[in-house]
Amino acid sequence: MLLLLCLSLFGCQNADAKGESVTYKGIVATYFAADAPVTERVVLVFGGSGGGIYTANRMANTFSKSGVNAMAVAYFGVQGLPQQLANIDLNYFEKAFEYVVSKKGISREKIALMGISRGAELALLLGSTYQIGPVVAYAPSSVLWGPCCNDFPSGTVGWQYNEKPLPHARQLPYQQPNENEYHGTPQFMKSLQGQDLSAATIKVENIPRGIILVSGEDDQLWPSTFMANQIMDRLHAKQYKYPFKHLSYEGAGHVISPGARSNIQRSTLANGYVIIMGGSSAANAKAQQDSWPQVIEFISSKQLME
């Protein structure tokens, strides 16, 4: 199912021949060097629940074309890595940080993180855990969620650190209006409002050098605008001292990240099951086109280098 979803959204081919495959201590990554860099920063890019490295390659390639060096990093769904988003240990990503520092000569202070959906959740988690930033989060989450997207044994988590499970929000049961369709947002909203989330909440105030959130107000896969607003409220409450903003787009859905097709409101899998994404083609395209220059300006800001 995940592979088919990836095919429908992104095509699942490598972005182009420009990317340099990375072989380093077991990480699966592709490095995209900008032809004319506008900043010294390197962005580590993470895809979402589709797995693999395809969507991350697309986004990293888009960064490189905009003058920013970027490295797409897979974390499940490829050979040599976990095949599902389950029990992903943060220690794996330390090797990606190490590669950029040792092989590309970039200090940790100049590493940025960018992700979409579950990848945005990951980027925010890594930034808060390792004090690496700034962070760009498309369709973000304010909390950690469990494994995705199949049935797992009791005790399985989405994320762990030093092999210790990290607390996560539970997805509470929700009756879908159509058994052949998945409407994620109502279920996630029920889950966000129906349990104590203090342990699962991402400590975004620990992220240095800034945060930019991008969401579609008609996101039907999960309530990214609601969760982005939760993040903003937390940053205000914690008197976060770095720049932060939320770019929220009326009528846009889940598929608003760079490199993705903008005309995806739903995705029909080969078995006929339909994933509802939300948004309209025009609103999704506007979100992509309006947010991207602001993301590049944010990432390139000399203020965030200090």
Image (cartoon, rainbow, N blue to C red):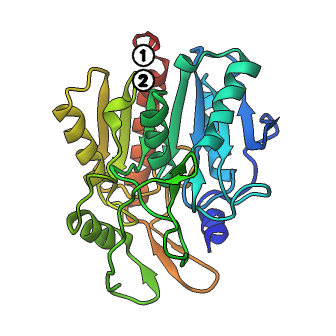
Badge 2 element: helix
Percent x, y of residue 133: 46, 27
Q: Quadrant of residue 76?
A: bottom right
Q: Quadrant of residue 131?
A: top left
Q: Mark 2 and mark 1 in contact? Answer it, CB < 8 Å.
A: yes
Q: Is residue 148 above or below residue 235?
A: below
The span from disc 2 to disc 1 (Cα, nearest Å) is 8 Å
Residue highlighted by disc 1: 304
Identity, as a three-letter code, of the amino acid under mark 2: Phe
**Which label is found at residue 298?**
2
Residue positioned 62% across, 86% down in the render: 271
Residue positioned 77% across, 35% down in the render: 19
Q: Is residue 238 above or below residue 157?
A: above
Residue positioned 42% across, 58% down in the render: 254
Residue in the foreground of this view, choosing between 86 and 11? 86
Percent x, y of residue 43: 58, 29
Whether residue 249 is visible here, answered yes or no, is yes
Q: Residues within 10 Å of mark 2 (few under 14, many from 20)?
A: many
Whether residue 61 is visible here, answered yes or no, is no
Percent x, y of residue 121: 44, 48
Q: Is residue 90 above or below residue 224?
A: above
Residue in the foreground of this view, choosing between 270 and 115? 115
Q: Nearer the viewer, mark 2 or mark 1?
A: 1
**Which label is found at residue 152?**
none
Identity, as a three-letter code, of the amino acid under mark 1: Leu
Q: Residues within 10 Å of mark 1 (few under 14, many from 20)?
A: some
Residue in the foreground of this view, choosing between 213 and 162? 162
Badge 1 element: helix
Tell me how many marks there are.
Answer: 2
Earlier along the polypeptide chain: callout 2 or callout 1? 2
